Image (cartoon, rainbow, N blue to C red):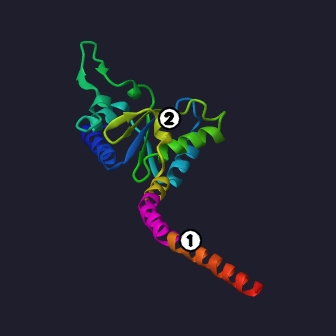
Amino acid sequence: MNRTDKTALIADAKERFDRAVSVALLNFQGMTVETVSELRRAFRKAGVEYKVLKNTVIRHALADSPYKQLAGDLAKDRKGDVKAHVALRGMTGVAWSYEDPAAAAKVVETFKKERAEKAQKLAIKTGMLGGQLIEGDRLAKIPGLKETRSEILGLILAPGANLYAALVVPGIQIVAILDTWVEKQKAAGGAE
């Protein structure tokens, strides 16, 4: 791969990282091609983009982002090695979520449960959300977009429902008291 192709690949990865709401870096070591293809289909179905990238591409794409600590020092030491975050060692798959921050992590959890023997080593190395690195299991526990929307809607509607109850309940109680009084009056008038 020549320099212009590498630069284009880094620019594409940087654009995806910038657009994403959350990102999960995956270790897919030990999975067959067939199992990885199934995982890709599950990601696509959930609206998550998945791609396998070289760690150096990821590091260069994240160099000028809020996730600099993941990129590490891009300069090589005397031995020709670079200091990178532990999540950028070994094979790395990248799952970008553009709408639901927990989508990628939930797909991984579901996939591991359904295909336990095929996806034993599938794991989230780290997650990225809001400029911070998050452990994979914590990323999966974040409420999804639908749950968050329904929770917000409930919070918005609660004051109105409480106000309605505060205004209506006293009137209902007065009507019940008056009905009881009328019934007593009828019973007292009919007894004579």
User: Which of 130/95 is in front?
Assistant: 130
Residue under the image location 32 percent in, 24 percent down: 84
Residue under the image location 27 percent in, 44 percent down: 11
Relative to residue 1, is residue 180 depicted above or below? Answer: below
Mark sitting on residue 164? none
- Which amino acid is tagged 1? Gln
Name the residue at the right extreme.
191
In the rendered image, residue 79, in percent from the top left (x then y), is placed at 28, 13
The quarter of the displayed image where residue 30 is located? top right
Name the residue at the front extreme.
192
Name the residue carrying label 2: 137
Which contiguous range is marked in magenta?
A: 153-169
Which mark sits nearer the N-terminus, 1 or 2?
2
Asked whether 7 falls inside the magenta stretch, the response is no
Name the residue carrying label 1: 173
Quarter of the picture containing the N terminus is: top left
Q: Nearer the viewer, mark 1 or mark 2?
A: 1
- Which amino acid is tagged 2? Asp
Mark 2, Cα crowd under 10 Å, few <14 / some 14-19 / many 20+, is some
In the rendered image, residue 116, in percent from the top left (x then y), is placed at 65, 35
In the rendered image, residue 105, in percent from the top left (x then y), is placed at 49, 41
Q: What secondary structure is the magenta-colored segment mainly?
A: helix
Relative to residue 55, is residue 50 depicted above or below? Answer: below
How far, Cα to Cα, is label 1 from label 2? 51 Å
Mark 1, Cα crowd under 10 Å, few <14 / some 14-19 / many 20+, is few
Quarter of the picture containing the C terminus is: bottom right
Residue under the image location 48 percent in, 44 percent down: 104
Is disc 1 placed on a helix, strand or loop? Answer: helix
User: Which of 39/146 is in front?
Assistant: 146
In the rendered image, residue 156, in percent from the top left (x then y), is placed at 41, 61
Name the residue at the top extreme.
78
